[in-house]
Amino acid sequence: MVYIPRMTTLAPGVAAEFRAILGDDRVLDGSTERIIYARDGSIADGSCGVALLCETTAEVSACMGVAHRRGLPVVPRGSGTGLCGGAVPLDDAVVLSVARMRRVLEIDPAVPCAWVEPGVLNLDLTAAVTHLGLHYAPDPSSQAACSIGGNVATNAGGPHCLASGVTVQHVLGVEIVLPDGEVLAIGGPAPDPPGYDLRGFIVGGEGTLGVVTKACVRLTPNPPAVKTMLFDFASTRAAGTCVVDVIARGVVPAAMELMDSRMIEACEGFTGAGLPLDAAAVLLVEVDGTPADVEAQTGIAVDVARASGTRDVRIAADEAERALLWKARKSAFGAVARVAPNYYLHDCVVPRTRLVEILDAIAAIAARHDLLVMNVFHAGDGNLHPLIAFDRRDAAQVERVMAAGRDIVEACIAVGGVLTGEHGIGLEKRDYMGLSFGELDLDAQARARRAFDPAGRMNPRKVLPVTSRCGEAILDENSLPPGTWV
């Protein structure tokens, strides 16, 4: 079910209804503001009709009620750091921002868990509970800027999700405002709430089911000991082999991150962390647990790395060195700006045993399309992040970039991979869904989505492709009359 909206501005009186709820300063419909809210962290462009800056669940509910009565499409938005166009409004949709909902409402160290609003930044949540010896485990590289609401929407991951799991494993409950304005509470701190696991359906829903206004998140005790290692290799193939062999030895590190030579150069120039500029690849490995466990796991990891051909073993001597190494890794996306003004990436996941094969395939794809691809990824769980560095002002280059992106996705699916590990489907990967799912699969997903949003107004034209419902003809959405639901 996809909405083909009319290209139009808001009907007379609609902005006034929103202003009656939020006031003049939190209803943004000027040309500059509409341009700002028409983008997210991806390369997709959109068109925003009006941006609403809500600060409470009651305001979200009231605004959703107006949109429901007026039949307006709504795009929920957090910090706008998403990388797949999930928060990009199409055809003058209403953008409902929850970025100002930034309160940590309750912390319960006994569970341990916290109730937070969706605008709370990921890293700020950990900062709020550090004094209790706790942290919030999912840690996207953008954690200083991305919000919990956006993490819930995309089921975000991060470098330290190899052992601890992604967002869905750390969300115990949510409060969600449905498309008609009704407020629904799902789940909570109880370990096994009765009934269907709707919480698990909403996490990763990408704003297509409603607007999450609160989340109950699991907090994790800080480990008593941590050790961070950096191995450098003369080839990405050797680094990939090391990843597979470490886990085959029974060690599941807290994190295993791989960067290739071009990414090493960019990150080192950006942070000065002492990364080896002559390496073809580096592998950042972190283990945690009891001191005895950490020592044992470190020994195994070092032995495997040496057997795989590492040229050097660097073990962080203290917390400052550890933080510097992680700064280099988490600055990767920003460091690409030293190479090119834009980048395009997918975050497909492949089986660990196929890592070496897929790295070779990505290199061949880059050569075939005459493009620069820089690799940085969560190697332990096979979550790739090949960044194609380019200049979007060059139309011919953009065309090659899009073709290479599709080739990378198809190569990953061909070896048993999946479309996304943490960024979501959004707009950019919507039309790849048919590579992973058959007609009946897509139909089931469309029916579940429709149960929450019968009119299809929530983040329309995202996640599911046109003709997701069984029995639909294959249609070109551009040929449909405006205002049509399919």
Image (cartoon, rainbow, N blue to C red):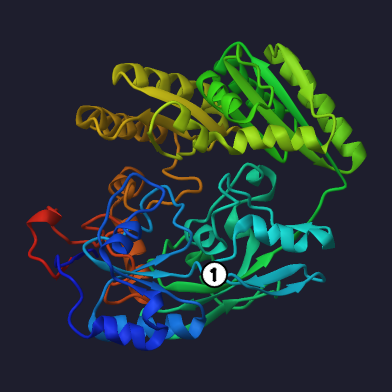
Circle 1 residue: 199
Residue at horizontal 38%, vertical 59%? Answer: 87
Q: Check disc 1: other Cα within 10 Å, few if <14, some if 14-19, many if 20+.
A: some
Which image quadrant for residue 286?
A: top right
Image quarter where the C terminus lies is bottom left
Q: Amino acid at mark 1?
A: Arg
- Asked whether the viewer can see residue 61, the reply is yes
Place of residue 318 in the rendered image (x, y in percent of width and height, measured from the top left): 84, 34
Place of residue 287 in the rendered image (x, y in percent of width and height, measured from the top left): 77, 37
6 left or right of 234 in image: left
256 left or right of 27 in image: right
Which image quadrant for residue 252?
A: top right
Residue at horizontal 59%, vertical 28%? Answer: 258
Number of numbered discs: 1
Residue at horizontal 54%, vertical 18%? Answer: 261
In front of the other: 329 or 375 = 329
Q: Is residue 441 above or below residue 283?
A: below
449 left or right of 71 in image: right
Q: Is residue 78 above or below residue 291?
A: below
Image quarter where the N terminus lies is bottom left
237 left or right of 207 in image: right
In front of the other: 368 or 468 = 368
Place of residue 267 in the rendered image (x, y in percent of width and height, measured from the top left): 57, 28
Judged from the image, the secondary structure of the residue bearing numbered disc 1 is: helix
Q: Is residue 326 above or below residue 423?
A: above
Residue at horizontal 45%, vertical 37%? Answer: 417
Q: Is residue 175 above or below residue 305?
A: below
Which image quadrant for residue 238?
A: top right
Place of residue 173 in the rendered image (x, y in percent of width and height, measured from the top left): 60, 72
